[in-house]
Image (cartoon, rainbow, N blue to C red):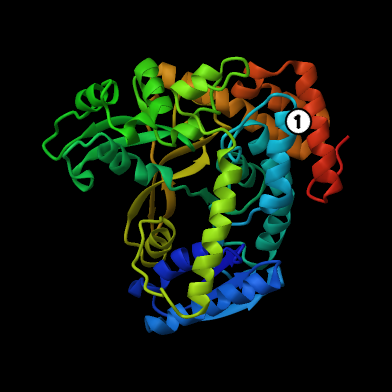
Amino acid sequence: MKICFLGAGSTVFVKNILGDCILTESLGEFEIALHDIDAQRLDESYNVIVALNKEYHGKATVTKSLDRREALKDSDYIINAIQVGGYKPCTVTDFVIPMKYGLFQTIGDTLGVGGIMRALRTIPVLEDFARDIEEVCPNAYFLNYTNPMAMLTGYMQKYTNVKTVGLCHSVQACVPDLLKKLQIDVDPEKTKWDIYGINHQAWLLKIEDENGRDLYPEIKEKAFAPNRGLSAKLDAVRFEIMRTFGYYVTESSEHNSEYTPWFIKKFNPFLIIKYRIPLNEYPRRCRNQIRNWKKQKENLLNGNFLEHKRSDEYGSRIIEALHTGKPFVFNGSVLNTDKIIPNLPEDACVEVPIVADANGLTPQKCPPLPEQCAAVNITNIIPQLLAIKASQTRKLEDVYRAVAMDPHTGAVLSLSAIKKMCKELYEKHHKDGYLPDYK
């Protein structure tokens, strides 16, 4: 059995995911193939995984290659964690140019103009990946961790023959984080819940304790209380969405503030204060992460902090289930084929429960979403689908349409401003070599 990791220069994330695999005894002897386009970072990750494998008496054989096809050849599982363009220049561009037009973002990696531009520069790379995979490891499973999740996973499933699933952290963190911030004394491991929708905007539709008691009344009482704690106050956007639409969404308030038209207003800074919205959060987060990663990487390369416990990341557990046949249920992103969620479009990429076992990956049929929840999801699905279309037509007018239909962008900018902004973003990314020619 062979696991290939694309984007292996992300040393800390590589350690977490592949460390989990090394600690999974049921995988037996297997090969880990690391690939990155940066030789130095690839060497660093290789040294860490070799040391971790030795530390835990792992049964993995670790290889590295700058040649993607060589790394992919005969792989059974592929973990994708690339970031095309990185923090500089691309993330900086995605924030600086929109600010010139009065458009502010928080994260900009999933939706909005930042998410769309990220998709447009990543999909051409995935096209190359798919061609290689279809030739050298056609039966491999492609576990995608790269954002924008719905656009990239939707592209892979619609336009390639690669067996793809999108993986995120937000679903498994949703209930534990919510109960903790509201100080509800219930063990999250013993709760029963239903979550589905789309990535970063899936809905917590039901939550019960081990005795079957509905926890939503207590959740809403504490979430809407004026004296709620600081961590709850920092989640004001999601609580306002829950107050209006009845249900809690999976991803953070800083994310959801830019997926909707209601919170970030150019001429209403009071809303930014009221809902504690951290504008330009992702560039700050990137700078902090880069500093922290450098420190962690130095410790890892020096042989320190190699202790690893199996995390709650889905990756190793999916691989284990597919390899051994022992079922594992997780939430992942797939096309809404056969109306898995009946009241969302069939070509949408949805996030639903999936069973991994000897039969492969089987998405579970879900009841219709509450109408208001489906309506909110559809406002995000439309720009996602238009962005995927733009990646295939290579027409700027299709890029304009995708960005114009983004709820936040459309609530702030005029159509003429959107076109000027998109053209300027395209020209900068194209000049930097991260976007192909568009007409």
Q: What's the residue at 43%, 63% (across, down)? A: 319
Asked if residue 20 lies left or right of residue 337, the reply is: left
Q: Secondary structure at mark 1?
A: helix
Q: Amino acid at mark 1?
A: Val
- Image height check: is 75 above or below 408? below
Where residue 74 sits: x, y (%)?
A: 60, 72
Which residue position is annotated with label 1? 399
Asked if residue 80 lies left or right of residue 399, the reply is: left
Where residue 175 sits: x, y (%)?
A: 30, 40
Q: Nearer the viewer, residue 91 or 372?
A: 91
Q: Residue furthest left?
A: 211
Q: Residue 194, located in which quarter of the rendered image?
A: top left
Q: How many marks?
A: 1
Q: Nearer the viewer, residue 375 or 234?
A: 234
Q: What's the residue at 48%, 37% (across, down)? A: 200
Asked if residue 326 lies left or right of residue 3, the reply is: left
Quarter of the picture containing the C terminus is: top right
Residue 172 visible within the image: yes
Label 1 environment density (alpha carbons within 10 Å; few <14, some 14–19, many ≥20): many
Residue 84 visible within the image: no
Q: What's the residue at 29%, 43% (across, down)? A: 176
Asked if residue 220 lies left or right of residue 74, the reply is: left
Where residue 70 sits: x, y (%)?
A: 68, 74
- Image height check: is 103 above or below 77? above
Q: What's the residue at 38%, 40% (across, down)? A: 364
Q: Nearer the viewer, residue 7 or 373?
A: 7
Where residue 408 sits: x, y (%)?
A: 60, 23
